[in-house]
């Protein structure tokens, strides 16, 4: 087992015994395989080899199974072994991997990175976790449609199954701490409901940062009951009146929210444990910069101490919420998790969490490079880190201990040099200059269109 685990770790710039080893320790991989019940049923595609191949597959620009198998065959050839150059055995081995394995490893890697954040990376000494949601699509198969139905506005046979995703990021490092997948249509499948399912991953003293969708009375009360503070945008249904409450400064006051009527997702037992009122601080934020869509908004927070958390600090923190959008873009666009490729719901979830594991390992390399360069992780480019890791991966797998140490030192310098551009208050239109190529749109199910072509019917 240890050879493929070494290859897996070296592919993400962490050979055994050096400072990177805690991102994906060999003992953790072995323990996770045992605890998740991974079994050895193939002499080539053991669980460790399969996990390595799957992880490098999602991190490679060519995310095909054939390319993943080619990497396995290259490793076998270097060791004087061989295997059949077909993808069937690998695909069956992926299906046998326990669904919880990549999720366990991804969450552990993210949380370790979150806990290792230095004091200088924190917000006023607090650990901030940012929540945001998005969607991912997958192949149009019957199984995927049943688990994650396509939007109702799309005709049957012309759309793709879509899963809703809510992810929790570490504001300091960008690591994914946890995530939840759910159906887009249906009851209790919205982003706020999915975040409630992840509440167990928040620790007392944390600060949750989110947009207005997550800022209901009942959500804020639940966070306070856990010892977690919240900073959210005030929901548009609430109208702030800064003439009332206890004034803390210009457009900054503390008010009392009364408990509204019980929503359908709150049961009687939960309602009985809810307070009758909440003391909430509301801060108006004005956006004076030209070109920004938003001119002003109101932040609602449970951080009531104006001396420790002044209004301008809260405004800057809420603006940092945009990092969640950038992190989702890195996960979906740079790593390619926006369009998943697997054809069954279980494999879709494995593929998504394998993307998250690869994302967190790249974030770990960026954090180490930032520390070595005296910078913050957010200043290091995710895409640049991924490109450097891909370039160094082949040499790292083949290097001995001495050469690997030299390669890692140089890798850190390369990654640390890939800084995010300093573009204060950059303004760009949400439009593309390059026109896409025009092509006819499919207006009927593919099987039907194919049958009409065979009959000579012009569509």
Image (tube, rainbow, N blue to C red):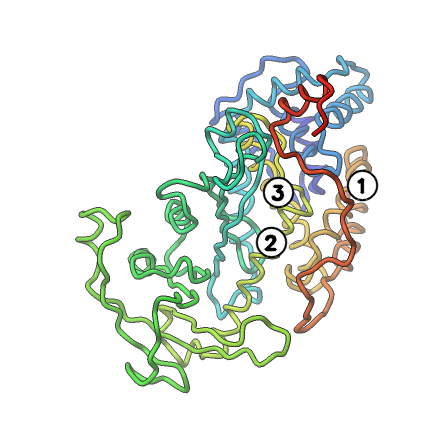
Look at the numbered disc 1 and give the secondary structure of its residue: helix
**Relative to 80, is 205 above or below?**
below
Q: Circle 3: is it few (<14), some (14-19), or many (20+) Cα within 10 Å?
A: some
Judged left or right of residue 385, residue 156 is: left
Which one is earlier in the sequence, the residue at label 1 or at label 3?
A: 3
The mark lying in front, picked from 2 and 3, is: 3
**Front position in the image: 310 or 17:** 310
Look at the numbered disc 2 and give the secondary structure of its residue: helix
Q: Are marks 2 and 3 in contact (CB under 8 Å)?
A: no
Number of the label disc, if any, that sits on residue 402: 1
Q: Are marks 2 and 1 in contact (CB under 8 Å)?
A: no
Task: Measure the alpha-carbon separation of dots 1 and 3.
Answer: 39 Å
Q: How many marks?
A: 3
Q: Circle 2: is it few (<14), some (14-19), or many (20+) Cα within 10 Å?
A: many
Number of the label disc, if any, that sits on residue 338: 3
Quadrant holding the N terminus: top right
Q: Residue at x 58, y 42 (%)?
A: 356
Q: Residue at x 43, y 62 (%)?
A: 212
Task: Measure the alpha-carbon separation of dots 2 and 3.
Answer: 13 Å
Q: Residue at x 46, y 31 (%)?
A: 147
Q: Which of the 4 image quarters holds residue 12?
A: top right
Which one is earlier in the sequence, the residue at label 2 or at label 1?
A: 2
Q: Which residue is mark 2?
A: 327
**Front position in the image: 145 or 323:** 145
């Amino acid at each position: 087992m240890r050879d493929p685990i070494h290859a897996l770790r070296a592919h993400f710039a962490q050979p055994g015994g050096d400072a990177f080893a805690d991102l994906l320790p060999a003992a953790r991989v072995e323990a996770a395989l045992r605890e998740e019940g991974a079994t050895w049923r193939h002499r080539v595609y053991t669980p460790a080899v399969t996990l390595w191949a799957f992880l490098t597959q999602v991190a490679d620009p060519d995310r095909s199974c054939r390319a993943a198998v080619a990497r396995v065959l290259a490793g076998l050839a270097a060791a004087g072994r061989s295997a059949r150059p077909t993808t069937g055995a690998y695909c069956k081995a992926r299906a046998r991997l326990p669904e919880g394995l990549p999720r366990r490893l991804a969450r552990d890697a993210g949380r370790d990175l979150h806990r290792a954040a230095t004091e200088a990376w924190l917000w006023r000494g607090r650990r901030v976790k940012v929540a945001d949601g998005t969607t991912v699509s997958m192949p149009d198969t019957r199984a995927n449609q049943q688990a994650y139905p396509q939007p109702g506005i799309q005709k049957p046979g012309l759309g793709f199954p879509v899963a809703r995703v809510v992810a929790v990021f570490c504001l300091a490092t960008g690591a994914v701490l946890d995530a939840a997948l759910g159906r887009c249509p249906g009851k209790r499948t919205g982003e706020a409901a999915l975040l409630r399912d992840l509440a167990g991953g928040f620790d007392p003293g944390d600060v949750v940062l989110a947009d207005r969708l997550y800022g209901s009375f009942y959500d804020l009360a639940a966070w306070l009951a856990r010892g977690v503070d919240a900073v959210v945008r005030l929901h548009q249904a609430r109208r702030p009146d800064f003439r009332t409450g206890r004034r803390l400064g210009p457009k900054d006051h503390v008010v009392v929210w009364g408990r509204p009527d019980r929503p359908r997702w709150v049961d009687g037992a939960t309602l009985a444990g809810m307070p009758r009122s909440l003391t909430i601080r509301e801060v108006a934020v004005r956006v004076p910069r030209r070109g920004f869509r938003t001119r002003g908004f109101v932040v609602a927070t449970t951080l009531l101490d104006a001396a420790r958390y002044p209004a301008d600090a809260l405004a800057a923190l809420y603006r940092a919420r945009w990092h969640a959008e950038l992190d989702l873009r890195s996960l979906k666009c740079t790593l390619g998790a926006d369009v998943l490729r697997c054809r069954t719901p279980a494999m879709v979830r494995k593929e998504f969490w394998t993307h998250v594991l690869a994302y967190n390992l790249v974030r770990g390399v960026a954090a180490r490079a930032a520390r070595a360069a005296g910078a913050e992780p957010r200043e290091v480019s995710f895409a640049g880190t991924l490109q450097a890791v891909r370039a160094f991966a082949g040499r790292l797998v083949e290097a001995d201990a001495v050469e690997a140490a030299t390669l890692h030192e140089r890798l850190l310098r390369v990654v640390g040099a890939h800084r995010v551009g300093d573009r204060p208050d950059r303004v760009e239109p949400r439009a593309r200059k390059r026109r896409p190529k025009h092509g006819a749109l499919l207006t009927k199910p593919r099987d039907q269109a194919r049958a009409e072509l065979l009959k000579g019917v012009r569509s």
